[in-house]
Amino acid sequence: MKKIILAIILLTTSIFSNAATYNLKVLVAFDTNSTNFTTTQMGNYSNNFVSYLNQYIVNSNLGSTIGFSLAYNAKIPVLPYPTWNYDQLKNYYLSNQTNRGQTPKTTLTSFQKYYNADVVIVVSNPHGSSTSACGSSYVPIKSHMDSSHATVGDLLEEPIYSIVFVTGQSICITNPKVVVHEVGHSFGLQHGQAVQNQYGGGHYVASEIISSGASGYADYTAPGTLLDYHTVMGVISPDEPGIHHPFFSNSSKFACGYPAVYKCGNNTANAVGIIQAFSNRYAKRSDFFYWKIN
Ligand SMILES: [Zn+2]
């Protein structure tokens, strides 16, 4: 699991329509125990989430492959206890054991099953979240494919990998990068380009990544300068400043660095390739959820 701490990021967004090969259905759950948005607000936030995801996908030249659409949004009790903190909430839903091969235990996973959602976005305000992360999600790694998780298909039977959390505070819920970054993690994407170029929290161990290239892209040659840039999967925090591009790393894209003529990825940081391969192999993630094989 990875947490991100956000600095302020401003982006212009627009809505793209796309005719994608794989249409991933999105369920947005607003926790009844920690949020109190109006129906209009929930609708707007939900539509924005889908627009953000589609925009970044289009920006990454993946629009013909993947598209997101809103299946449903609702107030759903997610936090079992109002006093739970973020880690307790994560552990409850993101544990390896949660619901594996079992009937849905929670209202949230029941909704996920009913709507056959490929991605579930939970908006909540767990206790203490104001000082911690804007978002959280589970990153499938190689160890999930060991003896207890024999194949990637087996891994994907678990619905937990499709649940991402976004804090309901304005700075988080209105920032496109938060939700896109977290959904990117659920595809197995990690943070920066390479350990030696990373500093601060959130760097990955190369042996853990689910597939070569399953990372963001960052160049910390000159941290905090115009040469410092990274993609949406780069860590977004005050101690890792720089230019964050609104797309996933792509070794064929030349729009990074300063001037913006450098590759936005390389052989070890080509998130677009991973998402493409992931989609080609598994199509809709909901097809691999446990209720499909029961
Ligand atoms: Zn992250």
Image: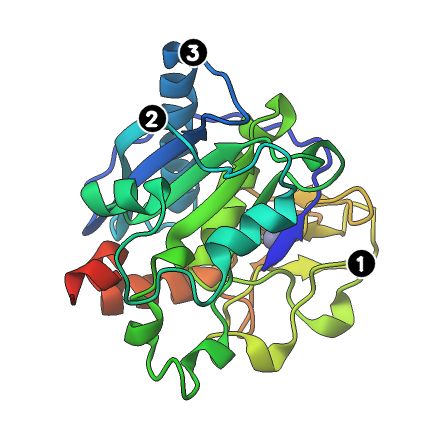
Comparing 89 with 22, the one in front is 89
Across and down, in percent, residue 51 comes to 38, 31
The residue at 29%/52% (across/down) is: 104
- Residue kind at label 1, given as amino acid type: Gly
To which residue does mark 2 refer? 74
Is 276 above or below relative to 26? below
Label 3 sits on a secondary structure element that is: loop
Mark 1–mark 2 distance (CA, rounded to whole Å): 36 Å
Q: Earlier in the sequence, mark 1 or mark 2?
A: 2
Quarter holding the N terminus? bottom right
Mark 3–mark 2 distance (CA, rounded to whole Å): 11 Å
Mark 1–mark 3 distance (CA, rounded to whole Å): 38 Å
Across and down, in percent, residue 242 comes to 74, 45
| In this rendering, position of residue 157 left or right of residue 38 | left
Ligand 1 within 8 Å of disc 2? The answer is no
Across and down, in percent, residue 282 comes to 25, 66
Q: For residue 257, say whether it is visible.
A: no
Is 233 above or below relative to 192? above
Q: Earlier in the sequence, mark 1 or mark 3?
A: 3
- Residue kind at label 2, given as amino acid type: Ala
Circle on res. 38: 3
Label 2 sits on a secondary structure element that is: strand
- Circle 1 residues within 10 Å: few <14, some 14–19, many ≥20: few
Comparing 4 with 177, the one in front is 4
- Circle 3 residues within 10 Å: few <14, some 14–19, many ≥20: few
| In this rendering, position of residue 84 left or right of residue 200 | left
| In this rendering, position of residue 248 left or right of residue 236 | left
To which residue does mark 1 refer? 200
Comparing 35 with 68, the one in front is 35
